[in-house]
Amino acid sequence: MAGEKAYITIDEFARIDLRVGKVVEAERIPGTRLLKLVVDLGSEKRQIISGIAEYYSPEDLLGKKVVVVANLKPKKIRGYLSEGMILAAGCEKNQRPVLVTVGDEAEPGWKIC
């Protein structure tokens, strides 16, 4: 098992609400490595704060369909409310995160299963 992490059950995994989200607004938070994103989840829009500003410009993300953890407890980050998390691969030290995206046919709000 990579990294000696514990297994979870299918019931634990089922608690994670993964949704398709479309980035409709993006801006850099001055003086940080953070981006403030507004993501359309179909029935609502959420603000998500993401630490990917050194790898992506706001313009890179507009219109992208990404995978969002939609039931993550909201949290204040540097004074900004973050209402979810965008998934990425390559999050180990010295790796560039690559956003997990979906095809154009997937609509905002669709559940990932």
Image: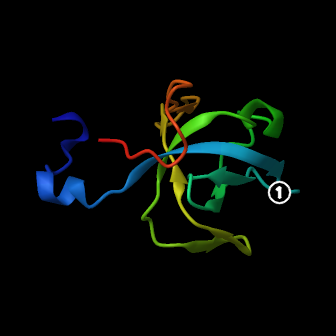
Badge 1 crowding class, 10 Å Cα cut-off, few under 14, some 14 to 19, many 20 or more, is: some
Q: Residue 72's x, y, as percent?
A: 44, 65
Q: Count up the numbered dots.
A: 1
Which residue is rendered at x = 46% and y = 36% of the image?
92
- Report the residue at 56% width, 33% height from top: 97
- In this rendering, the answer to whether 1 lies above or below 18 is above
Q: Residue at x 78, y 47 (%)?
A: 26
- Foreground pick, 91 / 108: 108
Q: Amino acid at mark 1?
A: Ile
Q: Quadrant of the N terminus?
A: top left
Q: Quadrant of the C terminus?
A: top left
Q: Is residue 97 left or right of residue 73?
A: right
Relative horizontal placement of residue 26, taking residue 2 as reference (left or right)? right
Name the residue at 72% across, 70% down.
78
Q: Which residue is mark 1?
A: 29
Q: In x, y percent, where is residue 111?
A: 38, 46
Q: Secondary structure at mark 1?
A: loop
Q: Position of residue 38 (x, y in %)?
A: 71, 54
- Please determine whether, in this image, residue 86 is positioned above or below residue 91: below
